[in-house]
Image (cartoon, grey):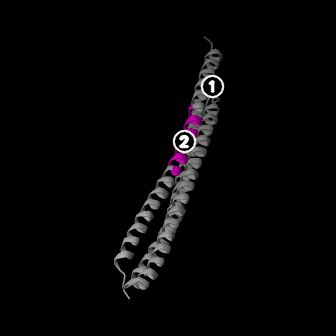
Amino acid sequence: MTKQAAARQTADEAKYATDDAKHAANNAAADTKNLAADAGSEVAERTVVGFKEASARASSMTADAQKSMGDNMEKFSHRLQGLSSFNQHNLEAFARSSEISAKALESIGSEFAAYTKKSYEDRVAAGQDISTAKTMAELVEKQTSFAQHAFEGWAQQAVKMSAIYTSAAKEIAAPLGERFSAATEEMKNIGR
C-alpha cells in the first residue's frame, strides 16, 4: 500500500470516527440540557407544592388557636392577619427562588452544552490540522499548540461557569434572605 493510499485510509477512518464522535457529543449536549431543564422544573414544582401544604397547615393551626382564645380575640386577630400575610410573603419568596433556580439550571445546562459542542468542533479542526503535518517537528508543534489552546479554553470555561454558579447562588438566596430578615423583625415585634 502506498503512503498516499495509507493516508487516505487514515483520513477516511478519522472522518468516520469524527462523525461518530460529533453525533455522540450532540446527543450528550441535548441530554444534558434536557436533564437540567427537567430537574429545575421538578425542583420548582416540589417547592411550591410543599409550601402550599405548609401554608394550609399553618392556616388550620391558626383557626384552632382563634377558638381557644376568646378573651384576647381582637389582639389575636390582628396578629393573625400579620402572620397570614407573612406566610404568603414567605411562599412567594420560595416560589421566586425556585423559579430563579430553574432558570439558572437551564442556563448552566445550555452553557455546558455550548462549551461541549465548541470543544468538539475545536478537536475536529485540530485533528484535521494535525493530519496535514509533513514532518515530526511540525506534528509535535501542532499537537502542542492544540493542547495549549484546549487547556486555555477549559480554564476560561471553568472561570465562566464559576461566575455563573456564584451569580445564580446569590440570586436564589436573595428572596430567602429578605424573608429571613423579615422573620427576625417580626420576632422582635412579637416580644414587645
* Quarter occupied by residue 145: top right
Query: What residue does disc 1 label?
Result: 15
| Residue 31: image location, x then y, percent | 54, 39
Q: Nearer the viewer, residue 190 or 188?
A: 190
Query: In the rendered structure, which amino acid carries the disc numbered 2?
Result: Ala
Q: Residues within 10 Å of mark 2 (few under 14, many from 20)?
A: some
Magenta part mainly helix, strand or loop? Answer: helix
Q: Nearer the viewer, mark 1 or mark 2?
A: 1
Q: CA distance from mark 1 to mark 2?
A: 21 Å
Q: Residue at x 43, y 68 (%)?
A: 59
Residue interval drawn in magenta: 24-41
Quarter of the image where the C terminus is located: bottom left
Q: Residue at x 60, y 31 (%)?
A: 23
Query: Position of 154 compared to 3: left or right?
Result: left
Residue 140 is covered by the magenta coloring: no
Is residue 192 depicted above or below 129 in this figure?
below
- Label 2 near label 1: C-beta < 8 Å? no
Query: Residue furthest toward the left?
Result: 68
| Residue 102: image location, x then y, percent | 54, 54
Query: What residue does disc 2 label?
Result: 147
Q: Residues within 10 Å of mark 1 (few under 14, many from 20)?
A: some
Please tell me which of labels 1 and 2 falls first in the chain.
1
| Residue 162: image location, x then y, percent | 51, 57
